[in-house]
Image (spheres, rainbow, N blue to C red):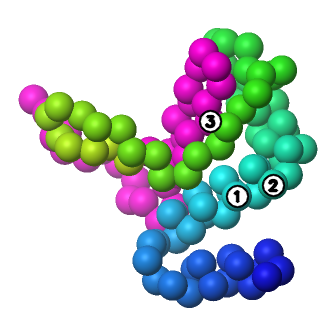
Amino acid sequence: MRSSQFFNAFHGAGLWGMEDYLTACLAALMTCEPQLKDAFVAWLDEHASHRLRGRRWDVIGQRSYPTDRFGAAIIDMVLESDDLILWCEHKVDAPEGKRTAKTD
């Protein structure tokens, strides 16, 4: 299956919204194209307090982390290295402004 057929089929399945589709496509592309992943990490490195370049990164889309208080927290995309985890949240079509927190 060609990549365009894969992404069209994935989006057409209607399982997720545009944000999750963006995440899945970006994670897949970064996994298949190390140069894209390196460019993304280099862009992040310019704004990070840790050195991000030169690490081996695994890219995971829709990573679930259990929480004691609110059930699973699902992060859009995660980049993991041996000693550092980066969480990436994409806000496609998300409303701007503040929201009410689930905590006090």
Where does residue 38 sit, x and y in percent of width and height? 84, 37
Q: Which residue is mark 2?
A: 32
Q: Earlier in the sequence, mark 3 or mark 2?
A: 2
- Give the spatial CA distance, label 3 vs label 2: 14 Å
Name the image quarter holding the C terminus: top left
Q: Give the spatial CA distance, label 1 vs label 2.
A: 6 Å
Q: Picture quarter containing residue 1?
A: bottom right
Q: Tell me the number on the disc at residue 42.
A: none
Label 2 neighbour load within 10 Å: few <14, some 14-19, many 20+: few
Seen in the picture, residue 63 relative to 18 is either above or below; the reply is above
Q: Residue at x 18, y 41 (%)?
A: 70
Neighbourhood count class around disc 3 (C-alpha, 10 Å): few under 14, some 14–19, many 20 upward: some
**Is 92 above or below relative to 44?**
below
The amino acid type found where label 3 is placed reads Leu
Question: Do callouts 1 and 2 mark residues in contact (Cβ within 8 Å)?
Answer: yes
Provide the residue designation for mark 3. 79
The x, y position of residue 72, in whole percent, is 27, 45
Q: Secondary structure at mark 2?
A: helix
- Main SS, magenta region, reads loop
Q: Secondary structure at mark 3?
A: strand
Quick check: can you spot residue 75?
yes
Residue lying at the far front of the rendered structure: 1
Q: Which mark is residue 28?
A: 1
Residues at marks 1 and 3, CA–CA distance in whole angstroms: 12 Å
Residue 89, horizontal then vertical, whole percent? 50, 45
Circle 1: residue type: Ala
Residue 102: x and y in percent read 16, 40
Q: Is 70 on the left-hand or right-hand side of 14?
A: left
Q: Which residues are magenta?
A: 75-104
